Each structure stands twice: as structure tokens, then as C-alpha cells.
Image: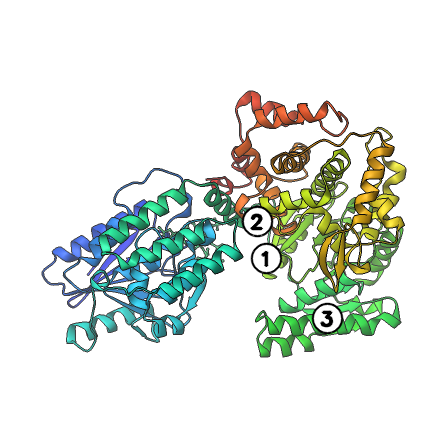
Amino acid sequence: MKDASPQALVEIETDGDIGLIRLSKPPVNALGVALRGAVHAAHQTLQDDPAIRAIVLYGAGRFFSAGADIKDFGKADVEPTLPQVLKALNNSPKPVVAALHGVAFGGALELALACHLRVGVPGLRVGLPEVKLGLLPGAGGAQRLPRLTGLSRAIDIICSGRDVAAEEALEAGILDLIIDAPARDAGIDAARQVLSGTLTALQTDSLQVAEDDASVTAARQRLAAKRPALAAPLKALEAVCAATLPIDEGLARERGLFMGLMAGEERAGLVHAFFAERATGRIPEQDVPPRDIAQLAVIGGGTMGVGIATTLLIGGYEVRLIEAQSDRVGAAQEAVTANLAGALKRGKLSEAGHAAASTRFTCSDALDTVAEADLVIEAIFEDMGAKTALFGRLDAICKPGAILATNTSYLDVNEIAAATARPEDVIGLHFFSPAHIMRLVEVVVADATAPEVVTTAFALARKLGKVPVRAGVCDGFIGNRILTQYRRAADYLLLDGADFAEIDAALEAFGFAMGPFAVSDLAGLDIAKATRDRKAATRPASERYSRVADLICDQGWYGRKTGQGYYLYDNGKATGPNPGAMEIVKAERQALGLRPQRFTPDDIVARCLTAMIAEATRVIEEGIALRPVDIDAVELFGYGFPRHRGGPMLQADLIGPETLIQRIETYAKDDPQFWQVPALLRRMQRDKRSFAEMNSGPKTTEKGQAS
Ligand code: 3HC
């Protein structure tokens, strides 16, 4: 018997005395109010059917379920809530079997834990990843998982949010058995074993959890040290500890902690980041089929070229790396080989994958060997003359239809395209260093770039596991343009009285892994100086210019690589601020007649963040970025913006246009050239609009919005 309408979220079916409930809500069977209501009703129907002796729940499509519907977060709870549905399942007098395939994450695993028996199929991954969304399991997961695994393992799984493979789940007691069959058949098989008495079905809520003070104390110390800025992991620990209480007390305690986190900014930031990662794929060209690409070439065997070649090899492509200077070919080849070995060590490549990648790689100085490449990525030094000359040669060498991409960080892609007779095939693919690790790729679309070249670039980046973001042509595109203003705000704070260590500490407390001056030391002060020197001729005379970094460079202090920069280094490890650099700062303040002001950590963060937001607003106004959420993705995946803060545009919405305008107008009293209110911000204040509202519309969906 089958009972389903085409729109049905669940399908009820019977197989003898077994009732089956199939979850069917593409793409991931998210347990929003409609699906969980349908599961609740279907369960009730089968409960009431005297011919049914056992019930099986399984999922249609690729997964059992991805858990609660993340889009519902921040909205009012609607009954039946997930905890109510799960309580009814657990109290069910008939045995209920969860048959899991693909993934069962979050609320989906919680649903399975509330059933009386869990069968997995090979390849299944389960987990409670709520902490990654600034939450904790809020539908009984923190109470029922420890009832099956014990406290210590539950703390590990819940507080890390990590995936657990089927085999580990079986060993830990999360699964009762693994059956190599489609989930439906596995469920029926398990249910039959329960009915025949070969397997025991247990009511999870009836189990007890032993105290384990040692594990709890160790976890508390570890979490406080590792993630001091995050609330969710420690709250999750508190929720797991409640599992030693009677079940209903524990469930109530867990739900209270869950609702507290749900209302917090950490949850808003992390959920925004989750959707930002996925929203960037919604581009005007998205319906145009991409070109096929199999063979790729990378030109330039420096750090960028080596990193790009590595990521392409890990992605399964055939790669030719061309280094024009023959005496550097060996070094480039060795660097790629070392990167691949690192990927093997980190588990990014299997043994077989590593061996295959090595055979797909060649490195030489012969540019004409790229003739058959489907896509060529140029990663030579940042010089327009060199790039246009190279693109002219590539145009002559490469086969028709080959895509010619430049990895430039700020140069004009239109000018580069104009050096070829096929500007429609030219695009910017701006990877971030180290390219085999960093996930952002700015896809820079020039005036003549063909739509299928854009979709090919997006498809490639996604295949590499990257986050591609569509950007227009301007100096620095999205990310480096915003970075420049952030850096300038930090440099001005330094001149005006904040010490570089104070600035770094304030931004690190906000959540950046490193403050701007520590980053400069790492990147090399000489590199940034070369860029400033190049731009000196076009810098407006009215622009405030801090000479501090130049003066530090004049000492031969280029940062970490020379042992001195803003900080002193011993064997590459910072040992403290460089007193010589502090002297330079003080002398420069004196020379400029500046009386040092006091800045609190909040002032420092406010100025740096406001400078980023103001520039990002201009980037949107000019159409360089499609939407605010794309800017957040750039900052999160390319520039180390703290994930739990969601990105500068989410922060801008939390601060509000009124406060931002007030701040800019106040700062502008000292420096009206740098601090200017973008017109869009004024319009947003007038129309009471948020950046989140600009994420909706034809280019994206509501999912790009802050929830
Ligand atoms: N809710 C709503 N939408 C979801 C979702 C969820 N739980 N999980 C995925 N989606 C959406 C994605 O946004 C995407 O939408 P789009 O195509 O419109 O952009 C679509 O489903 C497909 O997702 P992916 O692109 O990520 O597909 P993949 O195949 O790469 O990955 C996945 C699938 C492994 C399920 C991955 O999406 C994932 O990890 N999802 C999040 C799982 C999660 O965190 N669950 C916990 C939720 S919190 C919870 O359950 C609270 C509870 O304790 C009360």
C-alpha cells in the first residue's frame, strides 16, 4: 500500500506488518515545520493501524536528512516542534527503526537517536554540527547521544561538531548495525529482526548516563583555550553534562541553552556564513552551460603558480606548469611535489589520489606546450607590460576555445584581454595564497568575457572546493580594495596614538586570527612597499600618507623573514613588539606634530570595521560585487574575517546605517578625505533598508540574507 500525493513530504507505505515513512523534501530533507509535521502525522497514522507492528523511517534522495531547516532559525517556533515530534517517536509503543543513508546531521541524527534502533548503510556520515552554526543540539541530541555512547565520546562529537563515519558510529553505539543495502531494504531487514527477537529495540530515554568529571573538566579547559571567543562549544558541553539528569530535566535544560544561543549574534554570524558560501554561485550567467575542461596550464612557477597547480592537481586535473626561467623549473617542480605530499599527509589526497596526481603533472620552461590546454592560468609577477606580452603570445599558441585566465590581484583585466584577439575568452581568476589551502577565488568578469567562460570558471572553482565570487574590474577588485582601506584605517590609528600591538590585540579579540601589523610582518613589509612605490605617482596629493612602514623598511626590517618588523622574531616566532619600530612611530608622530590620542579596543575595531564597510558599500554601489553577501564571502574565505561575525556586511546591518554615518561624520572631522559617507548608506538610512534586503532579488534567494 502506498499513500502519497505528488507534493507529499512523506510517503507512507506498508510491507506486511511493517509501516514505512519516507522523508521526501528535496534537496536535503530539511526538517522544517512542514516535514516534521508530516512525519508526526504519518507516525500517528501507523501507530493507530492495528495491522502495523513496527515502523521504519528512511529518506528519499541523496541523504536521510541534513537536520533542522536552517532557514527557519530566528523565526518563532511552530508546533509540532522537533522535540515534540521526537518525544512522540521515543514514546511510541511500536518499535521505530531509523534507516540512514548519505548523511544524518543535526536534527536528523536527533530524530534517529529518538528511534528505538538505528541501521546505517555504508558511506553514511552522522554528526551533530550545531556548534558550527553557533548552536547546540536542541532536539535532544545532547541528552540521547551520551545515553548511547557515554559522556566522553558525546562531548567529543557534540563540542567539535565533527562528522562520524558509519563504522565509528557502529563502534560508538550510535548505530546498532550496518546493512549493505538501500536504506529502505536495510530498514525492513532491521525491523524484521526486531520483530523476530534477534535484535533488541531500546527506548533511548530510558537509559542512564554515568558521571565523568575527568572528561568534563578536560573538555572545559580544552574548549576555553582553543576557542575563547565562541560561546556555543562551552554551552554544548553544559548541555551534554545535563544528560546525567533525568531525561525530561535534561531535555528542558538543553532546550533552554539552545534557545539562548539561537538569539545570539554568534548564531547569526555562523548561519550567515553557511549561506554566504552557497549564495555566491547565483550569478546572472548561471543557466549557461560551461565549457568542458580537462587539461590545464599554469604560467609562472612562483608561490602563486605552484599553489594553483597544486590545487588543480588535487582537483583531479592534468596540469602543465610553465616557468620561463629554466633554472627555476626544478624548484617549482619540487614545490608542487612537496605540496602534494603535504596534501597526502593532511588527508586531502588518498595514497591512490596522490600517485595519480603526480602522474598528471609536468613542469617545464616550454610555453608552446600549452597549445592543447583547455584553460591557462597566468600567475606571473604583477606587471601590466609583462602580462599583455604573455597574453599576446598565449593568444597565438593556444587552441581556439581555450580560456585564458589571469591571476592578477588588482590589474585591469580589460587591458589584459585587449592584448588578445579573443577577449571573450579572457577572465580573471584571482586565487589567494596559499592557493591550495585558501578557499576564495575572485572570478573577475571583464567587459567582453563570454557567459560560458564565467560559468566554466565557477564550475572549476566549485570542483576544487573553492568559494568563487563574481567581481567586476577595478583596482583591487573586491577584496584588496577593501583591504587597502582597512589597512589605512589601522595605519592612521597608529599615527594618531594607538600602538600597533594594541591595534592587533583589539582586532584579534574581535576574532581575526592575526591583526593587520602581524599580517604585514608575515607577508613581508618589502612586498607592500613595492606596491606603494608603484602607486605613488597616482596617489592623490590630498591623501593622508603614513610613512611608518616605509621607515621601518628603510632599516632593512621586512618582518618575520628578517627577524624584525613591527615585532621581533626568534626562529619565526614573535617574541614581542620591536622597540625600534615603536621609536620610529613616536618620531613620526612628533615630526607631524601629532599629540597621541587614546583609543579603546572598541574604538579601534569600530574604525577599522567602519572603513571596511564604507569601501564595501562603494563596491556595491559601483556594481563591482553583485550583492552584500558576496562581499561577506570574500572577507570570510579570503581575508580571515572571523566566521562567527558573518562578514562586514552582516556587521553593518547589526550596527545600522545611522550609527555608521554618525561614526564616519565624527572621524571625518580629522580626515575628511578618507572618511566619506557613501551615498548608498545615506539612502539606506532614509529608506530604512538593510544590506540583507539587497541579497534577495533575481540574483540570489532569501538564503543569502542574515537570518
Ligand atoms: N537547512 C536548510 N537548507 C539546507 C540545509 C539545512 N539543514 N542543509 C543544506 N541546505 C541547503 C543548502 O543551502 C543548499 O541550498 P541551495 O542549493 O539553494 O544553495 C542545498 O541545501 C544543498 O546543500 P549543499 O550545497 O551544501 O549540498 P552538499 O551536497 O554539498 O552538502 C550537506 C549537503 C552535507 C547536507 C550540507 O548541506 C550540510 O552540511 N548541511 C548542513 C547540515 C547541518 O548543519 N545540520 C544541522 C542543522 S542545525 C539543527 O539541526 C538544529 C537541531 O539541533 C534542532
Report which quarter residue 212 is drawn in: bottom left
Residue at the image point whose x is 64% and y is 46% from the top: 505
Task: Determine whether label 1 and label 2 are within 8 Å by CB.
Answer: yes
Q: Earlier in the sequence, mark 2 or mark 3?
A: 2
**Number of disc labels:** 3
Residue 618 placement (x, y as % from top left): 68, 33
Q: Earlier in the sequence, mark 3 or mark 1?
A: 3
> What whole-number distance in Å separates the C-alpha atoms at marks 2 and 3?
29 Å
The answer to whether residue 487 shows anywhere in this view is yes
> What whole-number distance in Å separates the C-alpha atoms at marks 3 and 1?
21 Å
Instruction: Give the residue pinned by disc 2.
Output: 281
Residue at the image point whose x is 60% and y is 48% from the top: 636
**Badge 2 amino acid:** Gly
Mark 1 and ligand 1: say if the CB distance to the nearest ligand atom is below 8 Å: no
**Badge 3 amino acid:** Val
**Badge 1 amino acid:** Arg
Residue 605 placement (x, y as % from top left): 63, 38
Instruction: Give the residue pinned by disc 1.
Output: 462
Mark 2 and ligand 1: say if the CB distance to the nearest ligand atom is below 8 Å: yes
- SS label for mark 2: loop
Q: Is residue 248 above or below residue 548?
A: below
Instruction: Give the residue pinned by disc 3.
Output: 336
Q: Earlier in the sequence, mark 1 or mark 2?
A: 2
Q: Mark 3 or mark 1, which is nearer to you?
A: 3
